[in-house]
Amino acid sequence: MKFIDEAIITVWSGNGGRGCVSFRREKFIPRGGPDGGDGGKGGDIVLKTTSRKRTLYQFRYQKHFKAKNGAHGQGKKKTGKNGHDLIIELPPGTLVTDADSGKVITDLVKCDETFVLARGGRGGQGNARFKTSTHRAPRLAQPGESGETKTLKLELKLLADVGIIGLPNAGKSTLITSVSSARPKIGNYPFTTLFPSLGVVQTGWAEPFVVADIPGLIKGAHKGTGLGIRFLRHIERTRILIHLIDVSAIDTDNPLHAYNTVNKELAMYNQKLTEKPQIVVLNKIDLPDVREAAKKFQNAIKEKQVIIISALTGQGIENLNSKIIQLLDKPHE
């Protein structure tokens, strides 16, 4: 599935209901005055960010949105019901601009932000409003105001929900290839990945999420060694991290060497990166004679749950996706 980070949509707020022309008609009251009620207000178009949405995929097929019109006024001075507002849910990080002028309308960065994009039209006044001392039987009522029409460009500015970190050759590109439609270059040599690659993961039972495959880290990455600065700049924008470790490259005398090397670079670049939720994953478990190294790593990293996978064969991928969904479904801080 193509990653949808841009969309053009058209919205209409609701029209106001028209006012009513009516006169009081009751027995023994031959000259009842005007009693036409006002029309109801049209519904607004409201944008709201939610953690349930992580891409603009919903707008691939639905591009037109209209709020409800206000109901017309009635006799006995009954005001018509207001039209219901239409709430359009967006992922946090969505920039909303006018599609024609390019003018920024709003930048919705945080979760649960709301923005009234288009106001519904006001309801027209009924003829009871136009009664005066000299005009006792007005047959005039106002039509409702029309709602607003806007054509918008939506642009998702967040890079990804999940960033894959690790040393070069940990299998990051193979992992993103196995779980998504992304097809980054794969090779058995350092820095096969030269640019971030995005992939959308569809589990079939949860909202799709976006994974970024980014160049591997080496010692000194926080100073720009290798492709470090380019990489670290991108993961500042992700919500959670997958720390991928090549189980076949684990030093059994110092099993946490690769793990500590990467985390040290994160901390030296920006301490906040170490505070992101991090899923520790041992990859390449399909290779022979790696079980002992995996066991030593798990024993050494007692405070964290470790997920064991083979990105090549698909072993453990479903378990990994479940853990990712669990973390992504938690409310944003």
Image (cartoon, rainbow, N blue to C red):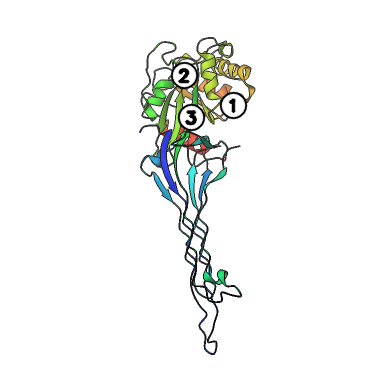
In front here: 6 or 180?
6
Residue 230: percent from the left, percent from the top?
Answer: 51, 17
Earlier in the chain: of badge 1 and badge 2, it is 2
Q: Answer with the quarter of the image where residue 106 lies.
A: top right
Pointer 2: what residue?
Answer: 247
Task: Count the numbered circles shown.
Answer: 3
The amino acid sitting under disc 2 is Val
Front residue (pair 265, 279): 265
Mark positioned earlier in the residue sequence (3 or 1)? 3
**Image location (x, y in percent) of residue 173:** 41, 21
Q: Residues within 10 Å of mark 1 (few under 14, many from 20)?
A: few
State whether residue 97 appears in this view: yes
The amino acid marked with disc number 1 is Lys
Residue located farthest toward the bottom when viewing the structure as drawn:
28
Front residue (pair 289, 318): 318
For the residues labelled 3 and 1, the Cα–Cα distance comes to 29 Å
Q: In the structure shown, which secondary structural element does the residue marked by tag 1 occupy?
A: loop
Q: Which mark is residue 232?
A: none
Gap between marks 1 and 2 measured at Cα: 17 Å
Residue located beneath label 3 in the image: 160
Q: Position of residue 200 (x, y in %)?
A: 41, 32
Q: CA distance from mark 2 to mark 3?
A: 26 Å
Badge 3: residue crowd in 10 Å (few <14, some 14–19, many ≥20): many
Q: What residue is pinned by disc 1?
A: 302
Q: Nearer the viewer, mark 3 or mark 1?
A: 3
Determine whether the residue tagged by mark 3 lies in a helix, strand or loop.
loop
**Snapshot quadrant of residue 220:** top right
Residue drawn 56% across the image and 69% down it: 130
Q: Earlier in the sequence, mark 2 or mark 3?
A: 3
Q: Position of residue 329 (x, y in %)?
A: 52, 40
Quadrant in which the N terminus appears: top left
